[in-house]
Image (cartoon, coloured by chain):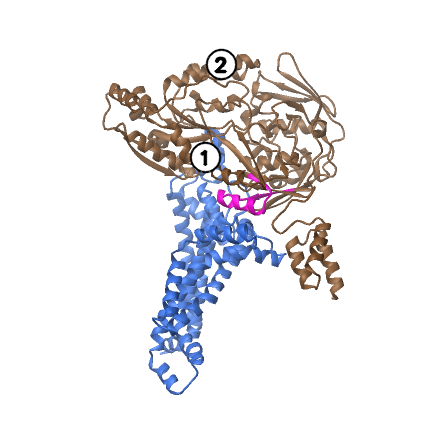
Amino acid sequence: MSEQSQVEQLVRDLSDGRLDRRTFLQRAAAAGLALGTANALAGALGADSAFGSTRAAGVLRVRAVGDVQNMDPAFIPGSNEGAVLANVYEGLVAFKPGTYNLVPVLADKWQPSNDGLRYHFTLRKGVKFHGGYGEVTAADVKFSFERTAGLTSPAIESPYKSDWAALGEVRVTGRYSGTIILKNKFAPLLTNTLPGFDGYIVSRKAVSDLGDDFAHHPIGTGPYEFVSWTPGQKTVLRKFEGYGGSWQRHVKAPIWSGIEFVPISVSNAATIAIQSGAVDWGPIGPEAVNSFKSDSKFRVDARTTLNYSWIGMNIAHPNLKDVNVRRAIRAAIDVPSILAAAFDGKWSRARSLLAPGMPVGYWKQAPAYARDVNKAKSFLARSGVSGLELTMAASKTAVGGQTIAEIVQANLADIGIKVQVLVQDRSVFNQLGGDAQKNRQLFYELFTTPTPEPSFATEWFTCGQVNVWNWQSWCNRQFSTWDAQAMKTLDPEIRSDLYIKMQKLWDQKANVVWVAWPTAYFAGKKAIKPSLQPSGFYQTWDFRQT
Amino acid sequence: MLQYLIKRIGMAFLVAVLLMVFLALLVHAVPGDPVNAILGQRSTPELVRTVREQMGLDKTVPAQVAQFVGHAFQGDLGHDFVSNLPVTNLIRNALPHTIALAVSSLALAILFGIPLGVLAATRPNGILDRLTGVVSISLITTPSYIAGLYLLLLFSLTVELFPAVGTGSFSHPIGYLQHLVLPAVALALGWIGYFARLVRTSMLEILNANYIRTAYAYGLRESVIVYRHALKNAIIPTVAVLGVGLGELMGGAVFVEVIFSRVGLGSLIVESIETRNYPVVQGCVLTVALLFVLANLLADLSYRFLDPRIRVEEST
């Protein structure tokens, strides 16, 4: 091949994306092209560098904390899939990017009934599914919701069935219209179920055609369509040319030609990947915040999540039955030191269950207990307990888990309580019921609350959850009753009062030490403006370039 | 020779069967519940029961062991609990990258470790020997994940010579090699030091042998004596270690794979152990173990070719 034809071939490969910029420059130089000329040519063609600088409307590379496993909205295992699927699927309604304002997306019209039991919807016409699966109809809406609720035949066993527990049926009234009919009032419908992935509309035909493969080949109506998943390497999305534009009533059109999610589980490696440009943007650990902030090439964003972490005490265990022992523990633990040591001082101190960002139920006056060793000793003396020995469990994967357990060990040693630290695999730590619960004493845990729905946080601590996720084994009928009542209460003020009363009641029982409302941190190239919900959930399709 | 080969293959087969049974028992002996780990906050007793039935975890341990071994012989290693993909697919996707990493690391270890050992042995107690000793011990004692992080900082972040993360694709060989260099070096460093020490010790012994003195007396060139006569014999213990080394590298690749976010069996095993994803753990460990057995078999066979005395001993 002549030098000229070699260069022509290289240029074709570069513009088609078969070569990266670095390889192009190397091969062009080998083919006799001057480096400056090759560089200019590559620049003119808008090629990515081998290390990933972002080109206008090019591919956005995002760090994912882990790989996707199952992309069926009815079986999503976690947030890794959630971040991908937010680009692929759309619901009838959703939160407008950057806010908790509910806006219609696939719905053209949206009308709740006065009693809150019926929600009439009319779909936008002509919105197409990816992959040639045709137009979205009310029958798809019915199928999507009833499928997760376990009402289709054959029924599926979705872990998110309870999010649709109140669903009676979706009645189809026309090709584009229908009504969601509830069995009872259900406040989380508009704060969790419909705006979240429970509300994504799937193609009935795609689910049927693809069978098990649907879990690894999502078909939605979103601005980006699924291209490929290379396990452990990347999930690739590309701009959907036939996009129905449902979001464009609220925000500008997406700019990226494609989005790639690259799984990087180790926090240090992710920091280096972002700094070196191997990925353009991504979530970072609290320990990396300062280094990004001090570098003008990067932009750091932070959002206080709705998640919460706490040190729990299992009151069913004989060692922790006495409220004065628990009060002693609460008074002895130094939460500010924990925040400084385990989270580099980058997470906010939690004072109760519901975080400040929760639109309903935040208890502003919740007490922050200061460490007081004398008070702790006096509580312990009042209990009459001496020579107490406890275990403190933390999961290996919990951020700062071991550090927290060790600080608790040191704090409690000051009041004469000996603590044995148990750092466990998640699968051991998460064992439910039986001997696991019987033996559980102190533990550190973090729960996530992905949507602005308080019941998502409170539901784990009711009587029905004892021996399941209520590891404090605290069963308070009043708390459970108020929780059930709040689920059926649509008035936000009345709901808020109920949740605050629940938190006050819980505080008196002294079976938890609230630790943190975690802050989610993100870093990326200065030119990238991320689109973040108040809780830190990111919608990559709405990322912009500044 | 044929008899020996049949005997060794028979032993390898027996090891494989015992290994499968042991593995199937081992994962059940480890505490932890895969269902709760997989379902997370959303698990309820009813859902746990359903998923447990789907996974076959409601059967007795002997039944599960028998099922695993029976299916494994048919090439079916079960399905990933989370993604529901066949484990063989996951292994097929990860194995070539782990082999590429292990083999390239071993190649680097041979390429640098053996000459370093020879160099040290031919100048015993000299500055070069002492320097090689210090370097070798330093390399042996540096964990691969520490080396990996420093390599990342230096060559990906500061110099921007190699990509920081990822595996690349076999369809783009240059890109693939770029992604392979740093992980392979991180994994190879310890083995370079180890091979250097091993070869030095063997070489020192051989260089004092009568036939080497005779070769010097005949006036043969030093390079011929060292590389053609001494090294050929000194290398036999190293070849024996190679078999174990390849297996160790496959297993040891885990930290490097995690740090460089590479696809591979190591990272697959770590993720699966955390969630007690039994079929994936069993399938991956079985694959690594079988490769280990195979590498040892090949090493055994190869030093029969290198050392004629072994053949003579067997024939008499």
* Residue B37 to residue A122: above or below: below
> Which numbered disc covers residue B9?
none
Kindly indicate which chain is depicted in brown in the rendered structure.
A
User: Residue placed at 63% from the left, 38% from the top?
Assistant: A528
Residue located beneath label 2 in the image:
A498
Chain letter belonging to callout 1: B
User: Residue placed at 38% from the left, 37% from the top?
Assistant: A402
A270 magenta-colored: yes
Callouts 2 and 1 close, C-beta under 8 Å = no
**Camera-side residue: A514 or A281?**
A281
Chain letter belonging to callout 2: A
Determine whether the residue tagged by mark 2 lies in a helix, strand or loop.
helix
| Separation (CA) of disc 2 from disc 1 | 31 Å
Kindly indicate which chain is depicted in blue in the rendered structure.
B
User: Which quadrant, please, contains the C terminus of chain A?
Assistant: top right
A429 magenta-colored: no
